């Protein structure tokens, strides 16, 4: 990269900067990739989108907005990309560090951005009444990101702020930045993939979040990052340059170490949370009351009451990991001035997204719970802790993560297991090693067209009056379903069909394959 180009890129920190003619290649054409291309063409850049397969709708729109499209194999840098000679490449978060095109970009010394960096650079397209762009808050963690992001945004809106959840939650940050209505605060959910791109360099495009949180850390996405250390390093980027509050989980020392190691803005505070009694600068639980000792005038001697566990229980929000999410979200909201009464009021109307500890039915004394969003072992541990003794539907695509530690920690407490997915062997072996007395049933997808209906039949056979059947797969869904949402929908459909039939739970006659 020439000094002139480097200087120009350093100057591109405003919507009103001169982006005209900048050659930018966009890798990938999902919702994120299209938002990047749409933004850059509006700014006057010369845009080439490179993807292996373009969705029809986006492919039709690209020439309308003025971007070029190249559909080609990406097992190496394609000829069209090389001849385009991009000055910047903006990659969708699905492109891993080991992807051959990403390796080529880095070897060529081409500036490599993610969509979050681009969004930060142009965040002033729409400003607040005081002339400043929206504040940003960052949320990451192995589990609980989406719920915490939605909780925080709900609290902010209840407090009278124009706030929007965006990022990895499904709404590209660039779409929120360009929304003509404008916002006071963006609550940005960040995946480890997006954070890896943010961590590539620290300069003009580096965000300065008002507050940030890493909820927890457990091994995940190892096939993308290459190692657990690389995954954790990416997550730690969330705290970089935080201005006001670095919120961390006291029950997860790794998040505290991330805060300790972070290069933050002078004056930023470390704010801890957990389910114990809070100390100064912490949020926690005292005698069934969620309490804030961080954002009160006399935090060494007093606390602010946020909400009671009893109130949360009435809303289905009192399971331990959800309480942790609520405390983290409250810390973010309180850091910008939202009052305790507003936090409480927001929780009176908050609804969990589908497939997150969702009650599906109660039939013949059996409670059916859909937590299909538990896509890794860490999430499943939280679900199993909330429903001890459950009949557990588990399995899918483990993405290089070892299921053994989860089975060792929790499987002896489950009543039975129903194993689904393509990676069934590691689950069987883990039960044989750590919980040999637990009945294990297996659904072989090669022998049935409806995996989830068969899983529900087997679970119903194993369950008795008063039991819970818990779908908490601890694995990704892509082996047998399009998304975790489809997996949960199919589970719910199978349960409803069973309820409508009025089937008893002992009509199957199945014999477990005990490991």
Image: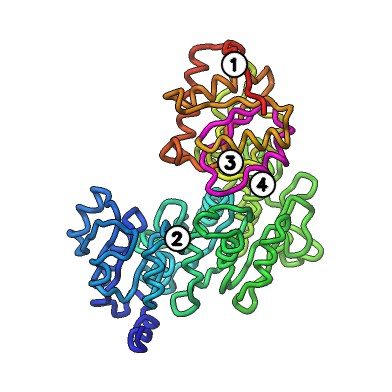
Q: CA distance from mark 3 to mark 1?
A: 24 Å
Residue depth check, mark 3 versus mark 1: number of the one nearer the observer: 1
Q: Residues within 10 Å of mark 3 (few under 14, many from 20)?
A: many
Q: Which residue is mark 2?
A: 96
Q: Which residue is mark 1?
A: 510
Percent coordinates x, y for residue 33 in the rendering: 34, 59
Secondary element at image label 4 = helix
Secondary element at image label 1 = loop
Q: Which residue is mark 4?
A: 323
Q: Is residue 25 above or below residue 20?
A: above
Residue at figure coordinates x 49%, y 12% from the top left: 501
Residue at figure coordinates x 69%, y 66% from the top left: 257
Q: CA distance from mark 1 to mark 2?
A: 43 Å
Mark earlier in primary sequence (1, 4): 4
Q: Which residue is mark 3?
A: 474
Residue at figure coordinates x 80%, y 66% from the top left: 300
């Amino acid at each position: 990269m020439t000094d002139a180009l480097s200087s120009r890129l350093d100057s591109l920190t405003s919507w009103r900067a001169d982006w005209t003619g900048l050659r930018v290649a966009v890798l990938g054409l999902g919702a994120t990739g299209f938002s990047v291309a749409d933004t850059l063409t509006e700014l006057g850049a010369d845009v080439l989108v490179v993807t292996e397969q373009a969705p029809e709708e986006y492919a039709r729109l690209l020439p309308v907005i003025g971007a070029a499209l190249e559909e080609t194999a990406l097992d190496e840098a394609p000829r069209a990309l090389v001849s385009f000679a991009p000055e910047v490449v903006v990659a969708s978060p699905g492109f891993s560090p080991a992807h051959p095109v990403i390796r080529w970009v880095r070897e060529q010394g081409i500036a490599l951005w993610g969509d979050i960096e681009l969004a930060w650079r142009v965040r002033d397209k729409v400003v607040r009444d005081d002339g400043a762009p929206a504040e940003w808050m960052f949320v990451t963690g192995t589990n609980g990101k989406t719920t915490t992001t939605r909780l925080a945004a709900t609290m902010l809106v209840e407090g009278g702020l124009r706030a929007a959840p965006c990022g990895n939650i499904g709404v590209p940050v660039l779409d929120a930045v360009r929304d003509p209505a404008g916002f006071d605060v963006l609550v940005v959910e960040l995946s480890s993939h997006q954070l890896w791109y943010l961590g590539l360099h620290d300069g003009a495009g580096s965000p300065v979040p008002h507050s940030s949180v890493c909820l927890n850390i457990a091994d995940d996405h190892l096939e993308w990052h290459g190692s657990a250390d690389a995954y954790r390093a990416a997550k730690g980027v969330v705290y970089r340059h935080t201005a006001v509050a670095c919120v961390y989980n006291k029950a997860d020392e790794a998040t505290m170490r991330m805060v300790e190691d972070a290069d933050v803005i002078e004056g930023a505070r470390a704010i801890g949370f957990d389910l114990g009694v809070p100390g100064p600068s912490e949020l926690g639980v005292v005698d069934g009351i969620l309490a804030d000792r961080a954002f009160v005038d006399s935090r060494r001697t007093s606390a602010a009451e946020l909400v009671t566990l009893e109130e949360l229980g009435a809303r289905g929000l009192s399971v331990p990991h959800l309480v942790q999410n609520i405390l983290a979200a409250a810390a973010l909201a309180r850091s910008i001035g939202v009052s305790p009464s507003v936090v409480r009021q927001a929780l009176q109307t908050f609804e969990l997204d589908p497939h997150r500890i969702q009650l599906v039915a109660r039939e013949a004394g059996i409670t059916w719970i859909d937590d299909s969003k538990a896509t890794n072992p860490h999430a499943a541990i939280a679900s199993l802790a909330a429903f001890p003794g459950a009949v557990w539907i588990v399995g899918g695509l483990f993405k290089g993560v070892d299921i053994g530690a989860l089975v060792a920690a929790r499987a002896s407490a489950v009543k039975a297991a129903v194993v689904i997915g393509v990676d069934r062997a590691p689950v069987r072996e883990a039960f044989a090693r750590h919980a040999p007395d637990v009945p294990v049933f297996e659904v072989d997808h090669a022998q049935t067209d409806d995996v989830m209906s068969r899983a529900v039949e087997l679970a119903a056979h194993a369950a008795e009056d008063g039991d819970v059947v818990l779908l908490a797969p601890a694995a990704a869904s892509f082996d047998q379903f399009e998304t975790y949402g489809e997996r949960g929908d199919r589970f719910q459909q199978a349960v409803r069909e069973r309820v409508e039939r009025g089937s008893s739970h002992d009509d199957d006659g199945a014999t477990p394959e005990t490991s």
